[in-house]
Image (cartoon, grey):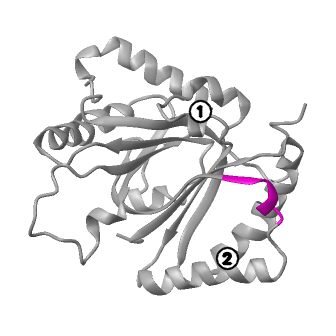
Amino acid sequence: MFAKKTFFSVMGVTDATKHHEYNEYHQLDHRPENLLLPGVAWGDRWVRSPDCVPASSGSDRNFDDAHYVAMYWLYEPVAQSLKQWTDLGELAWQWGRRPDMPWRKNHFQKFMDPLKGYVAPRVLVSNEALVYRPVRGMHFTLSRFRRHDAEVHETLKWYDRVRFPDLLTCRGVAGAWSFVTEDLLKPDRDTTSSYDDASWTRVTLLYLDEDPLDVMADIQRHDRANPSRLRDTSAVEDVLFATPLRAIIPWQWNWFDK
């Protein structure tokens, strides 16, 4: 796998007048500096524009005022890449280049491990190259699985063998990646005792070639036409936050303007 660690951030802007300033900072300052780091393979950020909100779902009301999702891929050696990452964050603060601090709200920030990538048959690139492929939008899902047992395993098998292949046939879905909380794959984790009752989190990203809302509508049509392919996962999985996201085009930051 080309990168062994990822970082996810879901955040909101608490001052509605600051979206232009935040995007200018992120796209023209923060992101270029991060991409320059030797340990960063790739990184980007997407917006939950107001028209995406009605298509959002999830049980955690903490995400109701979330506006942006960012993620970065980090190379091995992970310890070195993480040090570069955190050092740059402190340096930016020392340089006075963190204008977002007074009005940024962090909803979710976590390092996670990549699980598996999927690519639609019509897309000719590999699952690793998918990360670098341009998108018109994304779909982000954050879930908590309550256990680590046989029933959860059957749900994960359904995602891998049924759900993801079905999604790849829908209009505008170029591919997908799944990620798991890094606690489950730590080298020093305790493998001598059962952790069937342990809860853990998972992120799924869909990479979209077409307008995110059009893609979501086609997924809904597909699901209505194929009910036997669906599975109720609510006994083991809590979907905390699921939302379409739009690609951010530099200097076109007017989604929240009155």
* Residue 67 falls left or right of residue 4: right
Residue 52's place in the image compared with 200, above or below, is: above
Q: Residue 161's spot in the image, x, y percent?
A: 21, 39
- The numbered disc on residue 17 is none
Q: Which residues are magenta?
A: 99-105
Displayed quadrant of residue 146: top left
Q: Please name the residue that numbered disc 1 is placed on.
A: 212
CA gap between label 2 and label 1 equals 31 Å
153 or 235: nearer the eye?
A: 235
Q: Amino acid at mark 1?
A: Pro
Q: Residue at x 81, y 59 (%)?
A: 102
Quarter of the image that includes the N terminus: bottom left
Quadrant including the C terminus: top right
Q: Amino acid at mark 2?
A: Gly
Q: Residue at x 36, y 44 (%)?
A: 144
Q: Kindly indicate the quadrant of the structure image that contains residue 212.
A: top right
Query: Mark 2: which secondary structure?
Result: helix
Q: Position of residue 178 (x, y in %)?
A: 37, 51
